[in-house]
Image (cartoon, rainbow, N blue to C red):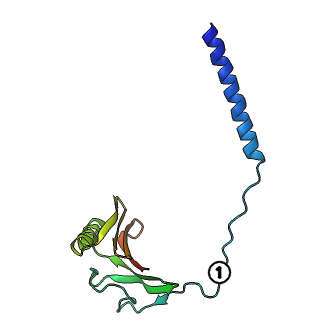
Amino acid sequence: MQSKKIFWLLLAIGIVVLGVIVYSLSKSKPSEPLVVQQSQDDLKPNVTDPAQLPERFPSNFPLEEGAEVTQNYSAGKDGYFQSTRAFTSNKTSAENFKIYEDFFTDAGWNIVVRLDQPGIKTVAATQGTTRAKVDIVDDETSKQTNVNITVEYK
């Protein structure tokens, strides 16, 4: 009988504490939205003709012959530089994942991310201060595989 009283007392205290927490959270002011101010000197991409590689894009990266290039640019500011090439692949996402995973391994890169999920795959690697990331996404609407390769230098 004594243990039932203790149980009900603890339950009542818990409900009161929970009520106080919910009430105090509902009365707190919402935080101010973060406003990011852009300057005219912000990073602007240098779009490159798809027939050429973007500036500082490694020439030894495997690229698919005949693939439609959808993005091809580079950008840099304050010691940071990025080079990106994206294309629509005629290969499956699994084939592309293996190509880039094998490339990074064979070329001596340190693979830091491996994501192999249905519909989306990512492999990212570092080599010194250089970082590279390959995102491979299956577009269910168009039934195409999109590959995005970004190389960053610091």
The one nearer the camera, 79 or 102, is 79
Location of the N terminus (image quadrant) = top right
The one nearer the camera, 129 or 113, is 129
Image-based side of 23 in relation to 115, left or right: right
Residue at left offset 70%, top offset 25%:
13
Image-based side of 100 in relation to 71, left or right: left
**Residue 75: x %, y % from top left:** 48, 86
- Report the residue that reaches farthest toward the top: 1
**Residue 71: x %, y % from top left:** 43, 82
**Residue 72: x %, y % from top left:** 41, 85
Location of the C terminus (image quadrant) = bottom left
- Report the residue that reaches farthest toward the left: 106
> Looking at the image, is 7 positioned above or below residue 97?
above
Residue 69 figure quarter:
bottom left
- Report the residue that reaches farthest toward the front: 128
> Looking at the image, is 21 positioned above or below residue 35?
above
- Mark 1 belongs to which amino acid? Gln
> Looking at the image, is 116 positioned above or below residue 92?
above
Residue at left offset 75%, top offset 45%:
26
User: Which residue is label 1 attached to?
Assistant: 38
Residue 7 figure quarter:
top right
Q: For the image shown, how many numbered marks are present on the structure?
A: 1
Residue 56 figure quarter:
bottom left
Q: Secondary structure at mark 1?
A: loop
Residue at left offset 25%, top offset 67%:
98
Residue at left offset 49%, top offset 86%:
76
Q: Residues within 10 Å of mark 1 (few under 14, many from 20)?
A: few
